Amino acid sequence: MARVRTVDSHTHILTEEAMRRLAKESPKVAPVLKNVNEHGGVLEIDGKVVQQPHPREMWELALRLRDMDANAVDVQVLSPTVFTFFYGHEPDLALACSIVQNDDIAAVVAKHPDRFLGLGTVPLQAPQAAADELRRSMINLGLRGAMIGSNVNGRNLDDPALEPFWATAEELGAFIFIHPHAGVGTERMGSYYLKNLIGLPLETTLAAASLVFGGVLERYPKLKVCLSHGGGFVPYQAGRFAHGWDVRGEAKVALKNPPAESLGRLFYDTILHSKTNLEFLIDAVGPAQVLLGSDYPFDMGNMDCVARVEALSIEPAARDLILGGYARGLLGT
């Protein structure tokens, strides 16, 4: 039987052309590469280091295709980077930056349509503009949805101002990938890389809980939302969410039905760094809710994502769903 066509749902890209075009918009959003060598460099924006190391694979397409072939990844879903969401800037500038990146991702996909799909970025601090750019990027450019942050300048994703965005995402059948950024409690996570090890999964958990208990997934039941890094702590604490809704009135303020109904609509990537934990996730939510992901090309990712799924103690049909069978339909391919 032929091997399933594998689809890596969680990757990032920032090409040199996109960096040049962003620099033309404003010095405040200009990505600057420093100390570049054969492996990569240091990326600064507005005088601040935002990524170190910043791997060369982020901008060299030949290296990306080489690594895909080496790791049996047939298709990557290209997404922007969290440090180029620009939620903290004025809406017009953030929109211009979204347009630059979305156009660039679409151009890369057009060059290699058999190897890439694209997700865009939107200026969520201006929800109607975000909705309009989501529509443009999907209808005009052929992108499949958007990668968004886990909060918008400290506002959770159930903020009423975001309703136009969620309504448009559901209408378009957009694939919305939530990626954590600017985590809570960072004042206590300065050591040991805890801002990533704990802070980012915590941010993902808070974003998901906001969508569930804020009633967003209940109001828009056709939303297609995927959580990065195996869903943070969501799968492990789903029982606590359910118990809290049963016994506490606060949990029912915006959520009419038990949280399990909304939780059941969420998707998760495979980036858990543990065979045991990934098997738990699949058992807890079902293989149709779990999508292959690598976090390419960052060091906290799993470049060997396909091999990790193939090593799981699960049925072949479940394995094939995770490797790409379900993602193709979810992404409209």
Image (spheres, rainbow, N blue to C red):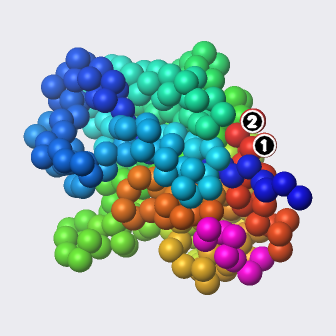
Q: In the image, which disc is placed on residue 38?
A: none
| Residue 224 drawn at (x, y percent) | 68, 45
Residue at numbered disc 1? 329
- Say which residue appears at 51% left-offset and 43% top-offset: 65
Is disc 1 surrounded by few (<14), some (14 to 19) or many (20+) residues within 10 Å?
A: few
Q: Residue 308 lies in magenta, yes or no?
A: yes
Quarter of the rendering containing residue 255? bottom right
| Residue 159 drawn at (x, y percent) | 48, 44
Residue at numbered disc 2? 332
Rendered position, 216 above or below 252: above
Rendered position, 45 above or below 217: above
Judging from the image, what secondary structure is the residue with disc 1 in?
helix
| Residue 91 drawn at (x, y percent) | 34, 25
Is disc 2 surrounded by few (<14), some (14 to 19) or many (20+) residues within 10 Å?
A: few
The stretch in magenta equals: 307-314
**Type of residue at label 1?**
Gly
Tell me if I can see residue 268 in this picture.
no
Left or right: where 149 falls relative to 48: right
Judging from the image, what secondary structure is the residue with disc 2 in?
loop
- Say which residue appears at 44% left-offset and 38% top-offset: 62
Determine contact: label 2, label 1, CB under 8 Å: yes
Quarter of the rendering containing residue 317? bottom right
